[in-house]
């Protein structure tokens, strides 16, 4: 199961299943967000109450097929409500109930003839059903619309496509037909979509078309560089970025775009160099430090540390905090402790107290580190969130020390002090899962969902855990579907959906979902899942590519190790040509054990 960001790390790492801020979506979920740039208003008028209540109850329970059936019944029973017909269409599409989606869409089109949202949904449904000529026609109509939102509906329809190959084909046809409006933001949006579709030919054609239309735009040159890198022409990509760099010092937005592109090319040192151009503030210094650390550029970190330390006698709290973090990057924990102890009061002081414990732990002074965390936990005058975080920190320190029992005990004390805190419950669930205590992990996640029934991350985490570590696949699917209703384009949730479909033996459907998840986010765990499904389907060369990409993103990835064990492959992954006999893997007609 994907892990949240570690408090021990000196640099941020994106972990896509972290709970984040708990949210309450309300009983009437934002169902009309799917495929639409803006949500529609709630239905009004005399609506048949019984099927509508049944539909919403089914939706809240993750029973999407039942929800689609009841919403359609409600829409057909109500004579003229376009919003209810729209809701029935979108829920049916989310449930992959295409026949019901077509019926609901006919109602919606009749009640809102010519509406852009109707055309967008119509194009999306045609695209998923393989009616590509019809989809192209509807998309061209949207792109020609004088309404400035027209292209957004077309973009949303393509972005929601389940089959990347179909989406790539249709998008390529639209480019060749000159259907994309000649406005740079529109081309940039569709260009980023083209780059995500894992189709080098389309990406090249698209970017060449953008360059022809907007030859002087630096953002277009950066997009072109991304496409060249994706095609393996990294030298050309770097040369193109070098031409843009002189403008970066005077244009902060361009500087940020360049840095992001270099980072995507796995060149964090160049990203840090670009971020050093132009005026600097604490935030830009923080980004540079993080990039230099990822590049393992000790000399660069040393220079930045000296630069910032020159005014070390009286810096502001944020600057002292950053100097402490830089000292940690440079493996100077004793100096880090001194900087952190010098942070005065305010919000930075709370983080400094947390970091002191981390730095002491790095010094091998574990007893003092735990005492520092305990002191913050017991400080009634401290900010409650800082006190809560001190329990999370102690748990992570004990996990690092291989003390699983101590980790759970620290989180238990935290829950005694902060009953039913969702972050503590989530952390303890992860701890139990790592210790293979799936029953207790489930108990904590269910307790979290009692406190916050619509916590999307907890729904996804519990659904994924049941899919990955038990055989309760249908229950897992319902939990993941509840999360999908709230965040249909969340890469982690799309990945979980693909994984539970795989465990159910629905391998082709799983492959579509996992490809979509990979297009949304290049995450090692998604790559591992995609590789395993391809391997079981006998598509070994493709599988090797995704296993290798996952390894490059995270060489010690736990999901990768477990997948290779399941498939009885060597720990360093399958060699080219190895394992081509499908007898070495689970049969393609059954889910992996």
Image (tube, rainbow, N blue to C red):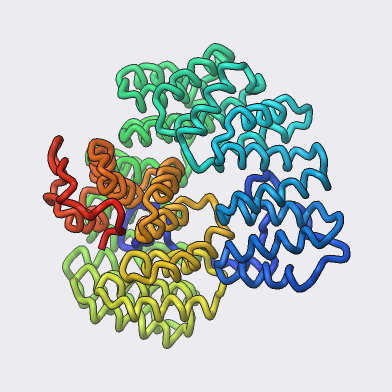
Q: Is residue 340 left or right of residue 195?
A: left
| Residue at the extreme bottom of the image, as rendered | 416
Tell me what residue is drawn at x 82 percent, y 40 percent: 113
Between 344 and 42, which is closer to the camera in this rendering?
42
User: Foreground residue, 348 or 523?
Assistant: 523
**From what the image shows, is residue 324 above or below residue 304?**
below
Question: Residue shown at 25%/44% (left/top)?
Answer: 547
Q: Residue at x 64, y 37 (%)?
A: 123
Q: Residue 373 location in percent, x, y?
A: 33, 76
The x and y percentages for residue 206 are 50, 21
**Left or right position of 228 against 418:** left
In the displayed structure image, the side of residue 321 where residue 549 appears, left or right: left
- Residue 349 visible in image: no
Residue 443 picture location, percent across and down: 40, 81
Image check: 539 left or right of 281?
Answer: left
Q: Quadrant of the C terminus?
A: bottom left
Q: x, y (%) of residue 118?
A: 73, 42
């Amino acid at each position: 199961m994907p892990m949240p960001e570690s408090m021990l790390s000196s640099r941020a790492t994106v972990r896509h299943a972290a709970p984040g801020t708990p949210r309450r979506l309300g009983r009437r979920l934002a169902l009309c967000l799917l495929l639409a740039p803006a949500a529609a208003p709630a239905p009004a008028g005399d609506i048949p109450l019984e099927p509508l209540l049944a539909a919403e109850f089914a939706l809240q329970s993750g029973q999407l097929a039942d929800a689609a059936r009841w919403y359609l019944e409600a829409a057909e029973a109500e004579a003229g409500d376009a919003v209810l017909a729209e809701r029935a269409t979108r829920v049916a599409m989310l449930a992959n109930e295409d026949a019901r989606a077509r019926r609901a869409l006919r109602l919606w089109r009749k009640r809102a003839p010519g509406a852009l949202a109707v055309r967008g949904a119509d194009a999306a449904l045609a695209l998923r059903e393989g009616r590509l000529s019809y989809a192209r026609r509807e998309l061209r109509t949207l792109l020609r619309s004088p309404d400035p939102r027209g292209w957004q509906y077309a973009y949303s329809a393509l972005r929601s496509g389940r089959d990347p190959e179909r989406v790539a084909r249709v998008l390529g046809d639209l480019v060749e037909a000159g259907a994309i409006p000649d406005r740079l933001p529109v081309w940039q949006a569709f260009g980023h979509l083209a780059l995500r579709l894992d189709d080098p030919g389309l990406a090249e054609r698209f970017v060449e078309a953008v360059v022809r239309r907007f030859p002087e735009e630096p953002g277009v040159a950066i997009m072109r560089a991304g496409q060249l890198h994706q095609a393996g022409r990294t030298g050309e990509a770097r040369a193109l970025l070098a031409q843009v760099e002189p403008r970066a010092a005077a244009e902060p937005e361009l500087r940020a775009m360049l840095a992001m592109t270099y980072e995507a090319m796995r060149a964090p040192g160049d990203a840090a160099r670009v971020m050093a151009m132009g005026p600097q503030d604490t935030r830009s210094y923080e980004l540079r430090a993080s990039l230099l650390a990822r590049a393992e550029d000790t000399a660069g970190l040393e220079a930045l540390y000296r630069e910032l330390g020159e005014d070390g006698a009286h810096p502001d709290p944020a600057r002292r905090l950053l100097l402490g973090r830089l000292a940690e990057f440079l493996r100077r924990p004793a100096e880090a402790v001194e900087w952190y102890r010098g942070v005065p009061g305010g919000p930075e002081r709370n983080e400094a107290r947390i970091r002191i414990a981390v730095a002491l732990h790095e010094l091998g002074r574990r007893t003092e580190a735990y005492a520092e965390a305990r002191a913050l936990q017991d400080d009634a005058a401290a900010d409650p969130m800082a006190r809560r975080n001190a329990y999370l920190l102690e748990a992570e320190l004990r996990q690092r020390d291989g003390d699983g029992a101590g980790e759970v005990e620290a989180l238990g004390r935290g829950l005694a002090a902060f009953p039913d805190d969702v972050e503590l419950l989530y952390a303890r669930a992860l701890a139990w899962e790592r210790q293979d205590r799936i029953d207790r992990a489930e108990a904590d996640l269910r307790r979290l969902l009692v406190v916050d029934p619509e916590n999307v991350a907890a729904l996804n985490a519990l659904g994924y855990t049941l899919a990955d570590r038990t055989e309760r696949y249908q229950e897992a699917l319902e939990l993941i579907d509840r999360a999908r209703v709230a965040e249909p384009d969340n890469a982690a949730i799309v990945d979980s959906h693909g994984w539970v479909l795989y465990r159910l033996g629905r391998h082709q459907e799983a492959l579509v979902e996992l490809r979509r998840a990979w297009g949304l986010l290049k995450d090692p765990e998604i790559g591992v899942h995609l590789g395993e499904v391809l391997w079981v389907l006998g598509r070994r060369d493709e599988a090797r590519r995704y296993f290798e990409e996952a390894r490059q993103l995270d060489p010690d990835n736990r999901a990768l190790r477990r997948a290779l064990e399941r498939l009885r492959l060597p720990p360093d992954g399958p060699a080219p040509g190895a394992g081509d006999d499908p007898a070495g893997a689970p049969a393609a007609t059954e889910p992996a054990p």
